[in-house]
């Protein structure tokens, strides 16, 4: 793992209480890239017994946050949209992989794929972030 992206992940996770509640585990961190995972619990299901769309979105959004901030430039989401090709279920291990697809000085676009343990696509998320003039880590 790259040193700065990993340090950014650890710093962000230390105060990201929602990601902590989801029990997110960091798997891989590089500049412009992050791969994380979590297990679906009962309280993450909707009334139909499948993963609530907000959970899939949140996992993808967390991967986006870790990837887009991996340069140690504080970045915030401008927009994002998701599709749900397949439902997730209780006990699934969901992995979110965020990859930078384009970037300039002020904005960047990321694609995030959420898959289950069988590599079935559960969510496909695309988002744009704004890069501020602040850093994540203390200088």
Image (cartoon, helix red, strand yellow):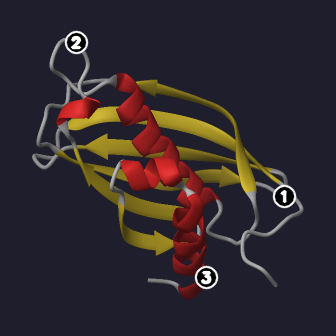
Q: Residues within 10 Å of mark 3 (few under 14, many from 20)?
A: some
Work out whether mark 3 precedes mark 1 in sequence or the reverse, and give the earlier one: 3
Left or right of 13? Residue 83 is left
Could you tell me if residue 97 is visible in this image? no
Identify the residue under disc 1.
105
The answer to which image quadrant residue 88 occupies is: top left
**Figure quadrant of the N terminus:** bottom left
Identify the residue under disc 2.
47
Question: In x, y percent, where is residue 106?
Answer: 84, 52
Work out whether mark 2 precedes mark 3 in sequence or the reverse, and give the earlier one: 3
Q: Residues within 10 Å of mark 2 (few under 14, many from 20)?
A: few
Identify the residue under disc 3.
4
Could you tell me if residue 92 is visible in this image? yes
Measured in 3D between alpha carbons, the distance from the residue under mark 2 to the one under mark 3, in whole angstroms, is 41 Å
Residue at 39% in and 71% down: 28
Q: Are the residues tagged 2 and 3 within 8 Å (C-beta)?
A: no
Work out whether mark 2 precedes mark 1 in sequence or the reverse, and give the earlier one: 2
In depth, the one of 118 and 12 nearer the eye is 12
Q: Of helix, strand and loop, which one carries label 3? A: helix
């Amino acid at each position: 793992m790259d040193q700065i992206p990993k340090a950014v992940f650890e710093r962000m996770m230390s105060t990201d209480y929602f990601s902590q509640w989801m029990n997110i585990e960091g798997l891989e961190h590089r500049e412009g890239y992050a791969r994380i995972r979590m297990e679906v619990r009962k309280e993450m299901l909707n009334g139909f017994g499948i993963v609530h769309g907000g959970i899939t979105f949140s996992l993808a959004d967390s991967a986006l946050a870790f990837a887009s901030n991996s340069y140690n430039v504080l970045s915030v989401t401008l927009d994002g949209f998701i599709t749900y090709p397949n439902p997730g279920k209780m006990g699934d291990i969901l992995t979110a992989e965020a990859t930078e697809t384009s970037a300039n000085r002020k904005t960047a676009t990321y694609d995030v794929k959420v898959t289950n343990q069988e590599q079935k696509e559960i969510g496909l998320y695309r988002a744009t972030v704004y890069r501020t003039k602040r850093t994540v880590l203390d200088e």
